[in-house]
Amino acid sequence: MKLFVDTALIEEIRKLHRWGIISGVTTNPTLLAKAAATNVRDVIVQICELVQGPVSMEVVSTDAEGMVREAREYASWHEHVVVKIPMTEDGLIATRQLAAEGIKVNMTLIFNPNQALFAALAGATFVSPFLGRIDDISWEGMDLIREIAAVFRNDPHITTQILAASIRHPRHIVEAAKAGAHIATCPPQVLRKAVRHPLTDIGLERFLADWRKLQGQG
Ligand code: G3P
């Protein structure tokens, strides 16, 4: 499973990209607002140049024509731009059109397996099921990943990738990998928590203390 970062904060992306484990970035209007990205085009292009992999930019139109118009504009910004389209009837129409034009789509706000199947049939490159938001209403978000993975596995024509989104904690990452997600898009703080283990810290401290002791003896 691949890892993307779910943020529009360029400095955060820069730091995390140095770890060598990040192959893409997802943004949405909320994340761009949090990053106070007034020049959205500039921010997205910078991210694309940095990660050299898929970078999702979401449309705000709700009608198919408007979505297609926006998507063409975003896709013209950089070859790595993937256009995020919401799972609606208009979203499906727009996705089919954009796929025919060779523009990559990430269908977002996926909350049931039928939505994921429809997105795949419309030609989406990625589907984004929102795990955390399902957990928030006391359902099991991971079951959705498992179901989508089973549906996609049963149709050899489907090449759409499952991009687990709304990741809230480190266990979501490993569980999504086990459930069959191709990618998990993670907020920076979740990646930072996931890299830490108290026994790693204690072990490192002991190794360094013993090394200093040895140097003292020498
Ligand atoms: O990629 C979509 C994701 O950012 C949504 O996450 O935490 O707002 O549910 P959250």
Image (spheres, grey):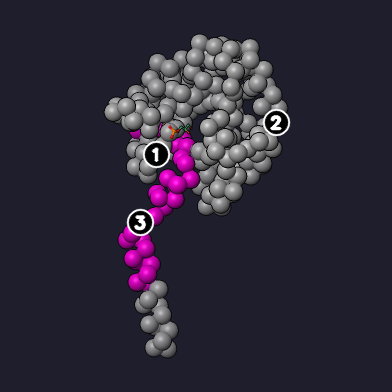
Residue 29 falls left or right of residue 183: right
The C terminus lies in quadrant: bottom left
The residue to which callout 1 is attached is 168
Q: Quick check: marks 3 and 2 in contact, CB under 8 Å?
A: no
Q: Nearer the viewer, residue 137 or 126?
A: 137
Which callout, 1 or 3, points at the residue further toward the start of the chain? 1
Percent x, y of residue 90 = 54, 11
Please give the residue where the numbered disc 2 appears in the rendered image: 77
- Mark 1 crowdedness (10 Å alpha carbons): few <14, some 14-19, many ≥20: some
Amino acid type, callout 2: Trp
From mark 1 to mark 2, how far is it between C-alphas? 30 Å
Q: Is residue 143 above or below residue 91?
A: below
Marks 3 and 2, Cα distance to the nearest angstrom?
40 Å
Q: Which numbered marker is on residue 123?
A: none
- Image quadrant in which you'd find residue 25: top right
The residue lying furthest to the bottom in this view is 218
Find out if the beta carbon at label 2 lies less than 8 Å from the nearest ligand 1 atom: no
Residue 15 located within the stretch drawn in magenta: no
Q: Secondary structure at mark 2?
A: helix
Whether the residue carrying mark 1 lies under 8 Å from ligand 1 is answered with yes
Q: Is residue 194 above or below residue 61?
A: below
Which circle, 1 or 2, is nearer the viewer?
1
Task: Give the percent coordinates (x, y) of residue 196.
Answer: 39, 55
Indicate the quadrant containing the N terminus: top left, top right, bottom left or bottom right. Answer: top left
The residue at the point 46 percent across, 23 percent down is 109
Q: Residue at x 55, y 38 (%)?
A: 34
**Residue hosting label 3:** 197
What range is drawn magenta here?
179-207
Residue 197 included in the magenta stretch of the image: yes
Query: What residue is at 35 percent from the left and 27 percent from the top?
Result: 134
Callout 1–callout 3 Cβ contact below 8 Å: no
